[in-house]
Structure formats: C-alpha cells, structure tokens
Image: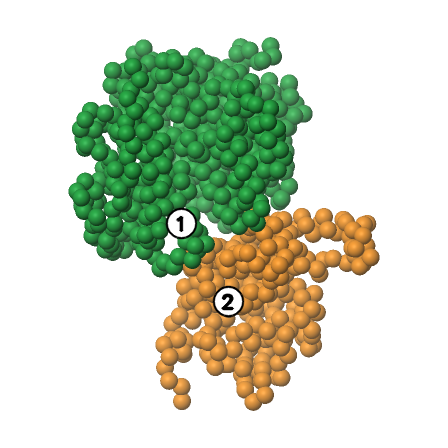
Amino acid sequence: MTSAQDASQGVSIPHLLARNAAQFGDRPAYREKEFGIWQSWTWSETASEIEALALGLLSLGVAPGDHVAIIGRNRPALYWSMVAVQCVGAVPVPLYQDAVVEEMTYVLEHCGARFVIAGDQEQVDKVLEVKGATTVIEHIVYFDKRGLRKYDHTAMTSLSDVQAQGRNASDEMVKTMQSRRDGLGSDDTCVMLYTSGTTGKPKGVVLSNRNVIETAQNSSNFDTLGPGEEVLAYLPMAWVGDFIFSIGQAYWTGFCVNCPESAATMQSDLREIGPTYFFAPPAIFESHLTQVMIRMEDASRFKRWMFHMFMDHARRVGPAILDGASVGLWDRLKYALGNVMVYGPLKNTLGMSRIRVGYTAGEAIGPELFDFYRSLGINLKQLYGQTEATVFITQQPDGQVRSDTVGVPSPGVEIKIAESGEVYYRSPGTFQSYFKNPESTASTKDAEGWVATGDAGFIEEATGHLRIIDRIKDVARMSDGSMFAPKYVENKLKFYPNVLEAVVFGAGRDRCCAFINIDLTAVGNWAERNNIAYSSYQELSQHPQVLEMIEGHVNAVNASVAQDEMLSGCQIHRFLVLHKELDADDGELTRTKKVRRAVIAEKFNDLIEALYSDAPEVTTETEVTYEDGRKGTIRATLSIRDGDVFPKLEAVA
Amino acid sequence: MMLENQTLAPSDGYVTADGRQIGGVMMDLRNITLRFGGVEAIKDISFDIREGEIRAIIGPNGAGKSSMLNVISGFYVPQEGEVWFNGAKRPPTKPYQVARQGIARTFQNIALFEGMSVLDNVMTGRLRQMSSGLFSQALWWGKAQTEEVENRAAVERIIDFLEIQSIRKTPVGRLPYGLKKRVELARALAAEPHLLLLDEPMAGMNVEEKEDMSRFILDVNDEFGTTIALIEHDMGVVMDLSDRVVVMDYGRKIGDGTPEEVRNNEAVIDAYLGVSHD
C-alpha cells in the first residue's frame, strides 16, 4: 500500500472520500447504466455530489447522532446518501428494499429515524404507510421522481432538490458541515446494519469507523486489492457484505463501484463490466451453472461432446493449475486448448473473464459447484463471516483454496473453539453493540471481546484452516455416538440441479434418512427431453424414472460422504421424494429459503416414521396454503427407496 | 380515484379530484354511424375526448367498441357523422395521415414484428420522427447518424419508463404475452402521441400484469400528459383508471359520464346483466 493510505488519514469514510478526491480525482468512482449507457462519476465529482447532498441534509435539519434510514436498490445516489449522512455526523441505516411494511415498521420504530432516504415510489409508499403511527419520521427524501409528482410535498423532497438546496448553502452552513465532518473519530458509529433475523426480531448491529476501516484495510491487503478493481454492486445495500465491499473497501482502495441498470439486467451488466473482484452467495453461482447446463443440452452434438470432454479435463487439472501446483506438460497443453475452445468463451458469457478474486459466503457451497468454477480458472474462494464481525472471520489465501474449509483467520482475527464446539472470534471488526439491546450484546460478546458465532466447527491441525460443520443447534449425535450434521449431506445433494431441497434426519437414530424436493425446472426439462408425460408436480415427483435418477444422486452422495472420517455415519439409508415443494407460505422454509427442520419434522412425522420402518411406500395427506391464502389438502402415496451405503472408513489414528 | 365531486365545465375542461387539470375538447365525435353492408356497427354515437384525460369505452362483446376506436384512428371512415380533431373537422384520411397528427395505438391482437428485437420494434415507432433519405440511411452517414442517436435516446427513455431494460435485445417472438403487450405500448409511446388509443391493453393478463399495466397507463398520462382512450373489459380496472366512461351496447351509446355515474346507470346495469332486448 502507498504511504498515503496509512490509517491516520482515514479515520472515517468522509475522510477517505476527501483523500480519494485528491489522489484519484479523475478516476471513476461510480458507474451506473442508465438509458442503456454506462454513466460514470469520478472521485472528484462524487465528492462534490456528496457535499451538496450533505449540505442539503443539514438544511433539512439532520442532527448529529440521528439515524437516517436508506432504502432502495443499489444506485450511486443512495451510496452517496450514506456518506453524506456521515458527513453531517448522523448514522446511515440501510434497510432491505424487499422488506414488507410490517418488517419495515419494526426497524424504523426501533432505530427512531426522523429522516428516510428512499429510492423510488414503491419505497416511499411503504414509508408513508409506516409514517405516523409509532414512528417519528419527519421527512422523506426520494431519488426517482417517477410517479411522485402528485404526492403531498410538505414533508417530502426529491434528492436533486435537496442537493440544489445544498449547493446554495450559506458559508455558515458549510462551516457547520465541515466541523461535523472533520470531527468524526475512529470510535464514532459508522453505520448501523440490521441482521436478517432468522431467529426472532432483527437486531441493529452498531459498527464504528474503526471496525469498518480497519477491516477494509486488512482485507484489501489480504487480496492486494488496488484502485484498479471493478466491482458490481448488486447485493442488498442493507447487507453488511455490500457495505464493506462497495463502501469500506471501495473508499479504502479507491476502486470503482458499478451499479446495474435494474435487478433483472444483472447478468448482462455483469458481462459488460467484467468485474475483477466479485462476490456472490452460492445460490447465484448455482443458478448460473444450471443455466449453462440447460443451454448445453440444446447445443449440437459436437459442441456437447467438446464441452464435456474439456470440462472433465478441467475438473481434473484446473484447480491444480490455479493453485500453482505441478501439472504435466500434456495436461497443461490440453487445458490451454480447452481455454480457447470452452473455458474462455464460457467465462465470458458468465461475465467472469476478468475475475482476480471472487468470494462466496453466506452458506456452505457444494464442493462440486465450487470446483466447477475453480476448474475454469476463476479464483473463487470462500470466506466465513457475519455482520457482528464486519464480515471477515476467516478467508482463504490464494493457493490454499478448498471447498470443505472456510480458510484461515483473516488478518487481525483471533479464533477459539469452545468446549461445545462453537466457534468464537475476536477482531478489530468486532461490533460495538446491538442497538437498544444490552442483554443480547452481553450474551453474544463477553467482557474480553470474544463473540459467539452460533456455528459449530473445528480447526484442522495440519493446515490451520477452519471447518464449519453446521449451526450448533442442528448438530447432534446419532445413536452410536457418531456426529450428525445434516447440512453437510444436504448441501452435497443440493448440488445436483435436479435436487431443489433436501432435509436429512438422523439425530438420535441409528441411521440417516432424507426427504428430497425435485427442482421442477431441471426435472421438467429433463422429462420433456425424455418424452415423459406428467400432469402435476406430484406425479412427476413419483415417476419411477425420476426416483431412479434421484437414487443415483443419493448413492453418489453416500460414496462421497463415506470418504469423510467424521461424518461417514451420515450416509442416507432410505429416502423419499416429497409430493410438494417446501414453501415459506406453509412455514416449512424461512423467507430467506432456509429449511425449518422442527416444523418439517413435526408436519411430516408420518413420513419420517415410514422411512424408519420397512414399508416400501407411504400414503399421506398434507395441508397446503395457496398463494391467495386458501388452504387445501393433497393426498399422495410416496414410494420409499433405499440408498447404497458404503462401509465406514476407520478413523486414521 | 375519487371523481364524484369533479366540476364539469363543457367549454374549458375540469379539474379531477386528484388535482389534474383536464383541458378542452381534443377529439369530438358527432353523430357517427358506421355500416358494414347491412350491419350497423355504430349507430349515431356522439362523445368527446378532452385534453389530458383517460377516457374509457366499455361494453359487452360485439358492442362496436373496436370499430369506434378504428373510426378514431382513421382506419374506418364512417358513413355518417363528423370527426372533429383539435378544433377542425377531419376529412376522410388514411391511417398514416392520422398517425402524423399525433395519434398512436396498440392492438387487441398483438401486432409486433416477432423476429425483431424489442429495441428495433420500439424504434419503428419513431418512423414519424425520421426524415433522412434512403441513401443516407443505407450508408449510415450524416443526417441518418445524428437522427439515429437522437431517436435511440428517446427510445431508451421509454424502455426505462416501462422497465423493459432486461429484454432490450430479446427478439419479441420469445417474450411472454404480458411483456409483448408492454412492448406494444412502448412502440406506441415512441411516436410521442398526443392521443393514445389502447385496444384492450389488459386482455389475457393475470392480476399482477394488470396492476403493472394500470400503473404504466396512469404514469404515461401523468408524466407525458398524454390523452388516453382505452377499451377494456375488466370493470375494476376501468373504474379505477378512467376519468370518464362511454358505454356502448349493440352499436348504441347507452351511457356516458364519470365511473360513478356509469356504475349507477340503469341501462348499463341491464346491458351487463344481460336483460333481454326486444
């Protein structure tokens, strides 16, 4: 890093902005595609936009310490809003744009925001609905004017008008803003982010300037990120990852943040920008892969043959080449040819030609999925983190990337494993507190600063890499005492495009059994190609050939699970394919599509009992909720199949 | 929209409940009668469309609604009656001449170029704004070039407005029905019409698509100040969207007024409930 980037110059994001405007004045800071053309703003333009906005907010009456809620899709103006809010000494609180009114009410009430900056009419409507009752919202600033012309503007202003007001601000105002901005210290709050609230109400995680900037500095050094990086900002602004990548690291290193034209154009915008630094949850990588596979099925026979031949080769030697391991000359030549014929064009289509550092996190990624991207030569790595840690807990250094670990502790992070197997960490990014919730703060973070993650894991002695097993509350023992970690097996199953969801049971039992949900897109596509007629999801799910196919997947997963010394007991002995898709409307999944084990186990108790008996099939009746809220029941007879179980490997002493 | 307490002043327009200023008469149809051989599709109908309003034409199947729209768009020339547009009596005209006067339309059955991309389809709506010669266009030189850039910018604004960025380069033939309808609206808007005619813009759509389309229609009227005349079957949509409604049945006008007035009109209720005609 250059000398200008030492920490003394950057105690806050606004300080870093001033530095970037001076140092990289002409370089692009933001791009956004609008009207079909990429518009860009340099760092010095960004600085003046933000200053105007900050002065405007000041004249609206934003006070130091205020929480200002920011809601909308990733757009430069909303990123500027966050920094402008900081410039006047207030705290930005980005909210999830797809939150429904009730969720938004809770958060706006809890943070006590007097000012809300909303992206468009949709968000303004939601805020207006919330306004009044129990919230103290005084004024709404909106960005996209569309449809808002007729609204009552006594307590509402467009962002451009706020900026115009700011540009005409008096010298006195400018002085006030400057003194607030320059007075920001390392321990002042940088941002407050709400956790998604999988268990109970969302909690407001308070992060200081030091948390954000030190973490950004450490992680940028870790991957040698420089001002030339390009990122695509498409993940929710309320999510800590986006805040760190698109603001923390972007302001620290001075790289350019690109905003897509709309949520639906993300894929083509990705291709046009070709980011060098990319982040996505496993689901995004998975859907891209499924698209590729389905399109390959439509390709001519020669192309299919070429694709599979080279992909097989890539799977064999690609990851080794990426890691710089020794690979024979012939294999290297064949890989180079494959790069011209298949990998290069494929990466280009995926928009991943230029990726230097790619991360996946949020959920465990299937090893086969992970290896697919690595084998193409994309430097995809894993990291493990959470909001309370300002993202980073562990990450994988280049050359030490494996699908089954989440890497070594990030710079400055200490890790310990408690008796219970739970992972604890302490780091410069450790959050300050949960807002207005001292009890939760105390139960999560102890006096010495150690934070409980809620995940069970262990550190591999040979490599020092952390391996996460499962949520601590889901990990259990089987009746013979061996470890049971359902998610590990479920993830392996879910890698198959045909499997949408899997739920594995086995806690306290002598063997594991599973429910499988087929993916209607993939299996339906397959059925069409094989002339298999079906009239409903239920019928397709019970088709003998579908069961045959799923059985093949289960056997392959068992073979792979058997390789793992700790978890080889988790092989699936019997399984059935569910007659309905697990659905959040029926309470079987959370809104973020995570499986709710307890609910499923209770609801389908008869099916579980049948799995643990010798019955070849089971008849069941299930209540379902339709989209309009009506309820009905479906009756089905499900056949139960056995998986091939492989002998346990003896633990190596 | 609440329209009960609007004030109707025949000469210079009125103000709607939500504060929109509706102007004077833009199109006046006087005693229109349209016959196909012995069949009278439209029988002596008169009504007007005012500047800036959303005017709906409703009625049961076969009532003559589409014929009425075709008279407005100049496709049919009525045997009797007069069409007054912008204060002048319109002589029998060709549809392209009507288009030049600033009237654009969408069709009940989608009429797009299936093999062309969305962008190119919308671009065809700009034809009226293009004047460079064949030679210059073929070489994409001089005037043709500047014209293309200007028109593309205008088209992009419409694409943004109707939120169809993600399908900009997709051939229309590959799109689902609801999106095709939206592309058709985009093409009509590309012509920058003063009067936009929509023939059943919501037919065959699901609830969500209808909501989207309703929002776009209101936004078009609001943002561009475009006057809109639409035919629609979905009564809920008509009542929510329109400022004034004409009701037709068997080629006759049986009602005209605000949605509220029309809803309580005895003849209209009969027509929709299917009371026998003698």
Point out which mark residue A523 bears. Answer: 1
Rendered location of residue A439, percent (x, y):
26, 21
Q: Say which of A245 and A62 sits in front.
A: A245
Mark 2: few/some/many CA within 10 Å (<14, 14-19, 20+):
many
> What amino acid is labelled 1 in the image?
Val
Task: State the green chain.
Answer: A
Q: Using residue A258 as the reference point, say whether residue A239 is left or right of it.
A: left
Q: Chain of mark 1?
A: A
Task: State the orange chain.
Answer: B
Rendered location of residue A373, percent (x, y):
50, 32
> What amino acid is labelled 2 in the image?
Glu
Residue matched to label 2: B200
Rendered location of residue A60, percent (x, y):
49, 32
- Residue A30 visible in the displayed image: no
Q: Residue at x 51, y 81 (%)?
A: B251
Secondary structure beneath label 1: helix
Q: Residue at x 48, y 81 (%)?
A: B250
Secondary structure beneath label 2: loop
Q: Residue at x 47, y 71 (%)?
A: B58
